Image: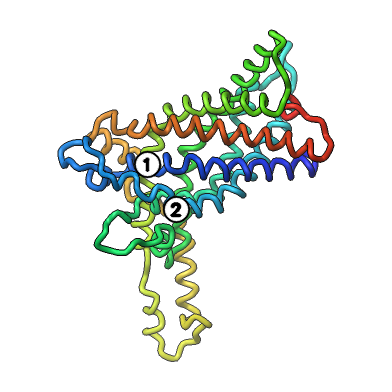
Amino acid sequence: MSENKNVDIWIAGAFAAFTVDLIVYPLDTIKTRLQSPDYKRLYTNGAKGYNGVNPSMFRGIYQGVGSVIIATLPSSGAFFTTYEGLKSVLEKNNPRYDGGHLLPQPLIHSAASGTAELVSCAILTPAEVIKQNAQMVDNSRTDRPRVNATVETLKRFRSNPFALWRGYTALASRNLPFTALQFPMFERIKQSIRRYRDERGIRTNTLLESGMITAASAGTGGSIAAVITTPIDVVKTRIMLAAAESAGEDQKPASQATKSAKDAIVDATGNTVQSAKENLSQAVKNVSKPPSRQGSMQIAREIMAAEGIKGLFRGGALRAVWTMLGSGLYLGVYESGRIYLAGRRGETRTADDLD
C-alpha cells in the first residue's frame, strides 16, 4: 500500500471509531448491564423476576467512554491497515485453479479480518476491561457523592496494571467469529447492491451513495453476526467484569521483602532490589492468568442452569440494534472518509477502487 493510502486508512478509521463511540456507546452500556451477573439485583425492582427495570439502568450511560475513545483510535487504524493489506496480498497471490482461484473470496475476507482482529484486540483489551467495569459503577445513590467511574476502575488495577490484558482471550474469542461472519457478508451484500444498481443504470458513484451502500451492507451483516455470537458476548462480559476482582487477589504485600532485610539496597521507590524483581516477575506471570477462576464453558453452563437458553441470548436484540447502527456508521464513515481524503489530494477515486 502507498504511504498516502496508509495515512487515509488510519485517519478514516480513527474518525469512524470516534463517531461510532459517541453515538452508540449508551446502547453498549445498557447491553453490558443486561448481561452482567448483578443485573437482577442492581437494575430491576422485583426480586423474583426481570420486570420493572430500575431507573439506574439508564444513568451514567457514558461511563468509561474516555478510555474506549483513546484506545479505539489506534486499534481501528491497526485493524483496517492489517485488513486491507492482508486482503490485498492474499488476492494478488491467490493461484488460479480449475478456471477460478484456489481460495474463495469469502475465505480471504475471513482470514484478513480475523488476523486484523487479533492485532486490534491487543490494543483494545485494556480499554474494554476498563470500559465494562466502569459501566457497572453505581452512581445512582444520592446518599454518597458521585465518582469518576473510569478513575474508580483504574484504582482496582493500580497495583497490577498487567491484569488489564487478561481479557484478551475473551475479547478475541468474541470478536474473531463475529468479524469472520460479518466481513464476508458485508463484502457480498455490498457487491450485490452495486451490481443491482449498475444493472438498472441508477448507480451515481457519489460519496453519499457509496456511504449509504457501505452502511446498509455493514449494518445488515453486522446485525446477523451479532445475534449469532451473542452467547459468546454474554460469557465475554462476565469474564471482563471478573477481571477487576481477580486483579486484587494476585497482590502480594509490597513491604515483605523490605521488612526481611533492614539494610538491603533500596531503589527510588523505597523497595528493595530483590522485592522489585519479584514484583515485576509476578506481574508478568499474572498476565497469563485467566481473568476469572471459571472457564468459559463453566460460565456458560451456569448461565444455562440459572436462566436457560434465554440467559445466553440476553441483550441479543439490543446488541443487534447497536451493531447495525455501529457497523453501518463505522464502515460507512470509514470508506466515505477514504474517498473524501483521496479527493482532497486531487485523486479521483470511487468505492470500487477501494476493493
Q: Is residue 126 above or below residue 342?
A: below
Residue situated in front as seen by the camera: 182 or 220: 220
Q: Residue at x 46, y 64 (%)?
A: 283
Which quadrant holds residue 297?
Answer: top left
User: Considering the image in quadrants, where does the C terminus appear?
Assistant: top right
Q: Decide if residue 137 is on the left or right side of residue 150.
A: left
- Which residue does the numbered mark 2 point to in the structure image? 64
**Residue 151 horizontal/vertical position (percent):** 43, 62
Name the spot of residue 89 as percent of width and height, x first.
73, 33
Left or right, residue 344 beside residue 63: right
Mark 2: few/some/many CA within 10 Å (<14, 14-19, 20+): many
What's the CA distance linking mark 1 and mark 2?
Answer: 13 Å
Specify whether 226 is left or right of 204. left
Which amino acid lies under the numbered mark 2 shown in the image of this protein?
A: Gly
At mark 1, the secondary structure is helix
Taking depth in this image into account, of 241 and 71 the one nearest to the observer is: 71
- Give yes or no for contact between labels 1 and 2 (Cβ–Cβ under 8 Å): no
Figure quadrant of the N terminus: top right
Residue type indicated by callout 1: Ile
Q: From the viewer's perspective, is residue 142 above or below residue 95?
A: below
Which secondary structure, mark 2?
loop
Residue at point 34%, 54% (across, down): 137
- Crowding at dot 1, Cα within 10 Å, few <14 / some 14-19 / many 20+, comes out as many
> Looking at the picture, does residue 350 appear above or below residue 200?
below
User: Which residue in the structure is indicated by mark 1?
Assistant: 30
Q: How is the image coloured?
A: rainbow
Tell me which corner region of the image, top left, top right, bottom left or bottom right, holds residue 302.
top left
Where residue 162 sits in the image (x, y, percent)?
Answer: 48, 60
